[in-house]
Image (cartoon, rainbow, N blue to C red):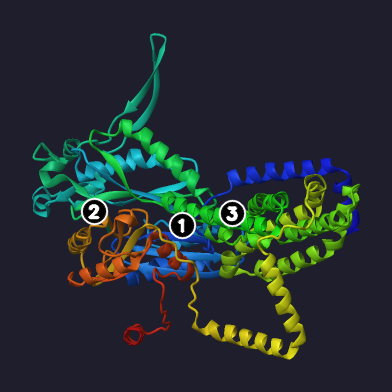
Amino acid sequence: MLKRAIDFPLDNPWIVILGLTVLIGAGVHAMLNIPIDAFPDLTNNQVVVTAEAPGLAAVEVEQLVTFPIESALMGLPNTLEVRSISKYGLSMITVVFEDWVDIFLARQQVTERLAQARDRIPAGTEPQLGPLATPFGEVYQYTLEGGDLSARELKTLHDWEIKYQLRAVQGVADVNTWGGFSVRYEVVVDPQKLRSYSIPLRQVFERLRDNNQNFGAGFVEHASEQYTVRGLGRAVTLEQIGEIVLGAHRGAPIHIHDVADVRLGSVPRQGAVTRNDKGETLSGMVIMLKGQNSDTVIARIKEAIEKMKIALPKGVELVPFYDQSEVIEGTIRTVRNNLLEGGGLVIIVLLLSLGQWRAALMVAFVVPLSMLAAFIGMRAFGISANLMSLGAVDFGMVVDGAVVMVDNCVHRLQTLKEQGVEDINYLEEMRTAAHEVAVPVLSAVTILIGVYIPILALEGLEGRMFRPMAISVVSAVIGALLIALFAVPAGCRYFLRDVRAEGKETFFGPLRRVYGRVLETTMNHRVLAAAVALVIVSVAMGSMGFIGAEFMPRLDEGSILVQTIKLPSVSLTESVELQGDVERVLLGFPEVTRVVSKLGRPDFATEAMGVYEADVYVNLIPHEEWTTADTKEGLIDAMAAALQQVPGVGFNFTQPMAMRLDEAVSGVKADVAVKIFGDDAEILEQKADEALRVMR
C-alpha cells in the first residue's frame, strides 16, 4: 500500500505540484494569521468575581461579602477550585473550571449563581465579573501627563474620553484606570446650623435626592409644530446644589449653603501612581481580550492613540511605560534568527555531506515547507507563535527522512553511472530507490512522533506548557515526512539527472573512513564497546542531579519590575512618599530612563494589592550602553544594594511578564512561595515567621 502511494505522485507529477501549492498557500495564510505571543498561555480556565465594599475591614468583608458569594459559587459543574481573598473594602473570588469548558458558558454559570448571592450581601455591594482576559492580557500601559489640567481634570479626561475610545478598539476587553483623583460633590453639613433651623439630617438627604433630577412632561402642539416639555432640575454646579431649598424659617427660605459647605472632593481611593520622583500621576492599563493576537491589538491601540492626540488638550500626552509588543518582537526576532541560523547550518552540512548541490538544495527545500506545515498545525489547534512553540522546532530532526531518501537516490544513480549505464530510466530508478527506504523512513519518523504522544496527553498546567511544543514539532515532522515520501522522489526524478559518478571525495570522506575503522574495532570488541556505552550512560544519568532546572526559559524582557512591600498599616500618603525615595534611588543609575510605581489597586479591582504594596516598572536603555554592569543580574544586584538605604521597604526583583507567569502558576508574584493552611490566625503567623527564618 505504501509503495502504491509513493508510485502515484511519481507517475503523476502534477499531484506533487498541486500538493505543494496547497501546502504553501495554506501555510502562508496560517503564518500571517496566527496569534503571536511571548509565552504560551499557561493560565487555567478561570472566572474572577470582584465585589467592593467601601469602609468594611477585611474581617467584615470575609464574613459579609466573600462567604455568601463563595458559598453560592460552590458546586458549579466542572469546577476544579474556588478560592478567595478578602482585603479592606474588597472581595475577590476566583472560580477555576476544567480547561475544556467554554469560557462564555463558565461566565454565564457564575453570573446565574451571583444572582442568588445578591440578597445575602450588604446593600450597595455589587459583584462584577472580571474582564474576559488572561494575566498576560495587560498589553499596554501608559501615564497621562502634561498640560495645565489639575489631577482631577486629568482623571475626568481619562475616564470620560480616553478610556472609552481605547475600549472601542477591536480586541480590547477593558481599559482600567490606576491612580488619580475621581471627582465627587461633597455637602459637609454643620450640625449646629441644622439644630438652629430645626431641620433634621434626613431632610437634607431627601431634598438633595428630590431636587436633583430631570423629568419628562410629554409634549405640546403649537403652530403646527410639536415641542417636547422637560423639567430641568439636575444640579450641575456647586452653586446650584447650594441653592436647593431645605425649608423655611420665619418666612425665609433655608438653602443647602445656609447649613452646609458645598465643595468638590475626591472619592476615597486605595491606589496611586507615581513616576520619576515627581509625585503622583495616573495611568491607564489596556487589557486585551482573551485569544486575540497581541501584536495586532497593540498596533490598533497605538493607531487609536495617534488619532486621539488631535483632540487632547494642549500639552497633554499619553506616555507609554509598558508595551508588550516590544517583548513579543524581541522574542520573535530571537526565534527567527535561531531558525534562520539553524536552517542555514543544516543546508551547509547537507552541501558538504552529500557532495551534490542539487541534492542538498532539494533537502534544504524541506525546511521552509515543514515550517509551513507547523504553522498549519498550530493554527488548527489554536496555538500561538511563541518562544515554546517555535523554539522547539529542530530542522536537523525534520530533514532526516528527506536526507535518507535523497541520499539513496543519489547513491543509486552514482552506482549506475559508475557501471557505465547511459540509458537510465529515471522514473523506475527513483521508484526503486524510494521503495527501498520508504519503510525505514516511515518507521523512524513514526517512532519520533510516538515520543511526543505522551506530551500531547498531558493535562492541566503541564499540558498548557508542553502541548504547544509537541503540536508544532509533530506538525513539522509529519509535513516533512509526507514531503520526503511523496514529493522528494518525484523531485529527484527531474533534478538529479546530471548527478556525477562517485569520484571526487566529499568533505566528509575522511570522516567516513575513520568511522569505518571505529565500527570495525567496535564489532571486534563487543564487550568493551558495551562497557564503554554503559559508562557513558551512567555518567550522563548521574549528571542529571547536578543540572539546574527551570519551569520556563528566562526571557530578557528589556525592563525590570521591582515589587516593594511596606508595613501593612502604612497609609497611602506615606506609601507614596516612600515610593518617591525608591524612584530617586533607581533613577540614580545611568541605565534607567523612566520609573513608574503603581501602588495598591486600580479603580476596577483587577489587582488585590494593598496600599503597602507597589509594582515599580523600570525602563532601561539598550544593553550595549550599560556602564554599571554587563549583565541584568549584575545590574539587579547593584540596585538591590542601593535600595537598602530606603528604610521600611522590602524588595523583590522580577520582570513584568515573568511576574504574571508566577502569579498564574501559583497565585503568588514570586519564584518561590510557601503556603501554610490552618484555622488559627496566631499559629499561622507563628509558623510563617518560622518558615521565613528557615528560608533566609
Tell me: 569 left or right of 126. Answer: left
Label 3 belongs to which residue?
A: 344
Q: Residue 577 lies in what quarter of the image?
A: bottom left
Callout 1, which amino acid?
Phe
Quote the CA–CA distance across marks 1 and 2: 23 Å
Tell me: 308 left or right of 351. Answer: left
| Dot placed on the residue nearer the N-terminal end, 3 or 2 | 2
With respect to residue 241, does 588 lie above or below? Answer: below
Label 2 belongs to which residue?
A: 275
Callout 3, which amino acid?
Gly
Q: Nearer the viewer, mark 3 or mark 2?
A: 3
Q: Which x, y percent locates residue 293?
A: 52, 48
In the picture, which quadrant includes the C terminus?
bottom left
Tell me: 432 left or right of 691. Answer: right
Q: Which x, y percent locates residue 657?
A: 42, 60
Label 1 belongs to which residue?
A: 136
Residue 277, labelled with which disc? none
Quote the CA–CA distance across marks 1 and 3: 34 Å
With respect to residue 588, does 244 lie above or below? Answer: above
Q: Is residue 298 visible?
A: yes
Residue, x 24% and y 70% (percent of image)? 566
Residue, x 59% and y 44% (percent of image)? 33
